[in-house]
Amino acid sequence: MPRITPQTPGQPRIIQVPPLDVSPPRSMRRAGRGTALLLAAFLLALVYLIYVLVTRSAFYMAKSGQTGYGRVTDRNGDVLFDGTKPMSEYEAGHFADVGNLIGDTSGQMSNTVVSRNIELLANYSFLYGKNSGTVTLQTTISHKATRACYQALGAKNGTVTAYNWKTGEMLVCMSKPCVDPALGYDNIDSMPSGSLLCKAFSPTVPGSTQKVSTLIAAYEQNGVEAVNALQFTCEGSWVNASGGKINCHNAYGHGTQTLYEAFANSCNPYFAQLVQSRLMPLSAVIGTYTKMGYSVNGQKAEPLVMDGLTIPAASTVLTDSNTFETQWGCLGQGKTVVSPYQLMLWQGAIANGSGSAVQPYILAAHTDIENRVTQLGRTTRTGQFFSEAAAQGVRDVETDNAEKHYYVSLGEYRCGVKSGTAQIRQEGREYENSLLTGFCLDDDCPVAFCVLIEERTGNDISNAQLAKVLLDALRSENITKTAPPAASAAGG
Amino acid sequence: MSRTNTNPVSHPFLLLLVLLAHTAMLLLVLLSFGLTVEVLKLACVVLISDFVGAIVLQFVAQESCTVDTVLLLVLGMSTIYQSCFGGLEFALKHFVFGIAAFLMCQISYVLVRNPYRAEKLKPLWYGSFFALVIAIFFLTGSRGIWIDLGFITIQPSEFVKPVFVLICASSIRTQLRKSEIGGWHFVPDNLMLLFCTAVIAGLQWYSRDLGSLPTFAAAAGCALLLRFMYLREKISVRLTVVLIIGAVFVVLTAWHLAPAYVQDRLHTDIWSDMSGSGYQQVKALTAIAEGGWFGKGAGNGTLVNVAASRTDIVFSTICEEWGLFTAIMTVVLVLFLPAALLTVPPRSYYHSGLALGVAAMFMVQMTLNIFGSCNLIPFTGVTIPFISQGGSSMLASGIMAGFLKAAQAPVLTGRSAAQLRKGGKA
């Protein structure tokens, strides 16, 4: 603060301006501190801004279409999408089995690998600018196995999804009918319904594959040994406490069965009686389902996410154990819907016997325009869906089922499976879908899978045969070895 | 004039730095456009302005010359930027307003360098404030923010900013003058500040121009903090907690009560509406990405075709042509103006409030502009001081720069000293 010396008569008044290095009083220093605080906050925010701009700039360029796009390849470098040249230059049908999974930059499909990871495909870097090289996004998908499954379906539609339950690598995610991006979208109105949608991610009626979830709920509530010892009688149909009639696919009935037998027979009356019994309080079933990821009675359940791809959660309606609707839901019909992806995920948790699955991933590696490779995929685990005891109990039941009833079709593999027939009512039509969900325990083929064939008849390929095609193709791919990053993808 | 030269760097040396910086930028312009008449015109105008500015400063100089130097540097840079966006065309209007801002800076410096006189003129500031508020209320268009005089449009709300900063500043003598009603002691000046803040908030709500509200709120908040703590040796924890809770409550209430058009901006996903409400920000972000670290070169940008490229999203326009590195350096340079306070602290309590108010205004304004255009906060449409195009904003910023200059090292004249003797602390 300025000081004034006492004035002496006859002498000029001296004004002493304090030198600049004199500290001002605390009250004024606070202004400086306030400014310093504001400056520090602003500079910190500026650093964050720089970080966001530099790391997100590829996304800005890709979303606004201001740069070229690179390639997406499968685990062996086979091109699944090519933004560097017209895809029509590839052999006819090259993309016809992966179009609705991988997608393209046309904007016609949103839940695809390309759409959800567009920033990784931009031929751009903040330092070098746009189109100064070509990026490659390597996936874990086996195009060979995908194509084998696609062709095995013949004229039928359906979906096959499979992943390595030890590492999390997504191996096959095929959905038929499928758009061929190389042909463009001029005929979009005449495309078969569902061509632009990967049905592996769409919830559908699971049929008797739902009995896996119901069995898990029983195990969680009563223990494995107690449930395995349960016996119920099937006479072809069964009338529940509220008068609802549950039919069995075997009109003559299965007689008195143990759990293992009922599971293999996929006996509806057995499981309906199990649901109605005092061993299965509804709250316990709801609790187990909720933990597994179901949306029960409209409760919110988080969707599943795999590298940006979104998979809606399973859902069901369970109101009263004595009613037909609830029992029918526990048998995988009616209002119960589950995506093949989620069925596969639970099989992964059963296969490893822990009750929590290895999280699937589809992006393996990214090679930027400077040929720097970044590994994207890594093995992580999901939350706990159910207990270890329940997982191991179901694994035993499923492997027993495979050994006794799928020996012919899957005999050379050590598998566990559960089949299902889903009754669909859609747009005034009624038809049945055939499902098979399971896992392979062989060291050279650790795969959890779900296959679904729409409107299958007796003359069509069976779901077990399709599963064998899948496993054969994957085993020949040597999937236990991690795929090398595709530094430069093969063209044509 | 009594002067103690404690400045470690002399005026001529700083002028040399300004000239070097501008010359470097002009060389880049030369590289982009080649040797043309327009380039020469721009170079001559900028460099001669630097010289003339330096000469003018000799008449209004003081111990520290940080604010003056930075102002000269920023104004020259701004002229070069605005002249090169999308192609070379000398931004005459921007340049003229730049000169006007420089002059306003000197005028406001002279006006408020004496804290006693500035404090005495407070009724004038209040009068100006309410005159501007009435002008906005009655003269602007239908809920608009501009007064159209035909040959020029004026944004009176910009001029409210420096006046509001003057209202925010207060002397210790004023703070000691307390009134009592019903056993409750209060400082009338503090109540007036709160009232003016409420008036501004109401007016902005009415004008549907809530974008500038955070700048006023920040200045008022800083002023109130400074006032409440002016004599305390330690900052009261209880008071701090109460103030924080109050601020959070106000923000949450405002967030909840914000009108529909504000709510829209708070929740807009620009990437799902790239040709609609997200258009400007998408273009701005893409331009930044295209510019990269070092830009596409002066005049090579395309963002200039987007509305508000020279004002609300000017940061992105600079990024596109000059690169993110240069744009950040420019922002940091503007920060040097309020940061000058840290090197040479104010010598009066009144100037402390003045400087902190300007610092809050400048920084919040830049935050809203830069982070809003980059989609990190809701996009509002305020300007970056001295960089954005706009006469009202430029003049208002110039006035506030004058406050900083006055706060930095006021020269006490004999008359001021006499006032000091009579009036005690300021």
Image (cartoon, rainbow, N blue to C red):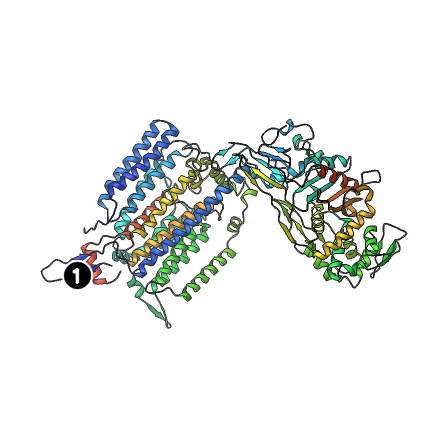
Relative to A330, is A143 above or below?
above
Quadrant of residue A296 within the rendered picture: bottom right
Mark 1 surroundings: few (<14), some (14-19) or many (≥20) residues within 10 A = few
Q: Residue A355 placed where, x, y %?
A: 69, 54
Chain under callout 1: A
Which quadrant holds the C terminus of chain A?
A: top right
Q: Residue furthest front?
A: A443
Q: Is residue A430 visible?
A: no
Q: Is residue B104 above or below residue A300?
A: above
The amino acid on which the numbered mark 1 sits, given as a three-letter code, is Thr
Looking at the image, residue B295 sits to the left or right of residue B16; the answer is: right
Q: Quadrant of residue A444?
A: top right
Q: Who's the residue at 78% across and 61% down the image?
A: A226
Residue on which disc 1 sits: A5
Q: Position of residue B155 (x, y in %)?
A: 39, 46
Does residue A162 appear to the left or right of B368 in the view shown? right
